[in-house]
Amino acid sequence: MNLLLGIRFCWSSVLLALCIQVCRSFYLPGLAPVSFCEPGAQKESGNCKSEIELFVNRLDSVESVLPYEYNVFDFCSSTEKPPSENLGQVLFGERIASSPYKFKLGEEEDCKLTCFKTYDPAVDKDVGKMAFLKKGMQLNYQHHWIIDNMPVTWCYEMEDGHQYCNPGFPIGCFVTQDGRAKDACVINSEFNKKNTFYLFNHVDITITYHSGAGENWPGARLVAAKLVPKSYKHFAKDHLNCGGPPMEIPGSFSNKMDLIYTYSVKFEKNNKIKWASRWDYILESMPHKHSVV
């Protein structure tokens, strides 16, 4: 019996070590650190760039076994060629694509237009797009965004007071015909209309960086990227309202509808976080613990 337990423990240890290594290969594929400089800085060169790109991955849901590539949904898209994927990303089925979200180090934006979409119930193609978007919200499909080879996380407080940082965030949420708020609809008391979808069409993004002071690299390095999804009903694409009532999509699609997507971005300096340990806050927030039985 002791020998059997020893063998089981040995194999469990090996599998756990392999799992950890795979996770590291998947999330931290050994890419070289990237330094960023503010636009116009003398340091800006091939080793120090000012533009920060945001990439998008495919969407998934715990309520469905089917993942979808980003461009299957009618979100804001980019015509740029997708970045090259490494072997680990290919093996894990990642489908990373470029996005229209691009930032400059130190340049903050408030309620900036990303794109807008118009849907007409008299057009069959629009009816199909709207139905697919609603189904995605009903099944709680999640975005997965990436900045500088790290996930853009949504951090929130759980019932026990513990902060959890999720490497994804929902498309939106749904309030059922009997008035029950599902999934993320519980976070806002304004999400209360029966048989209504609420689209997260705005994101508040915070990018944290180490300035490089006291280090031997040029410029700054990014150490965290977080966001908070919001829902806003904008008046028009040239009359944005990041702070008004939420973007409601009725369960019955009978009138023309404009969906306007926006974002805000700000930068925070934090020289206490080292680039090599920038993943720690995500790993430490995970509520589960590994054990070998």
Image (tube, rainbow, N blue to C red):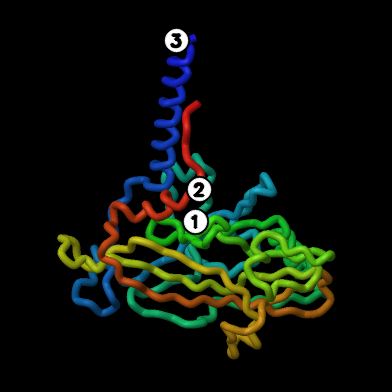
Q: Report x, y in % for residue 18.
A: 42, 31
Location of residue 70 with respect to 198 vertically, above or below: above
Q: Nearer the viewer, residue 279 or 186?
A: 186
Q: Amino acid at mark 1?
A: His
Separation of residues labelled 2 and 3 (CA atoms): 33 Å
Q: Amino acid at mark 2?
A: Pro
Which residue sits at x=50%, y=73%?
A: 204
Residue position for label 1: 162
Exactly how many numbered labels are in the figure?
A: 3
Is residue 179 rendered to the left or right of residue 33?
right
Q: Amino acid at mark 3?
A: Leu
Q: Earlier in the sequence, mark 2 or mark 3?
A: 3
Report the disc number at residue 287.
2
Q: Report x, y in % for residue 40.
A: 25, 79
Which residue sits at x=45%, y=34%?
A: 19
Q: Are marks 1 and 2 in contact (CB under 8 Å)?
A: yes
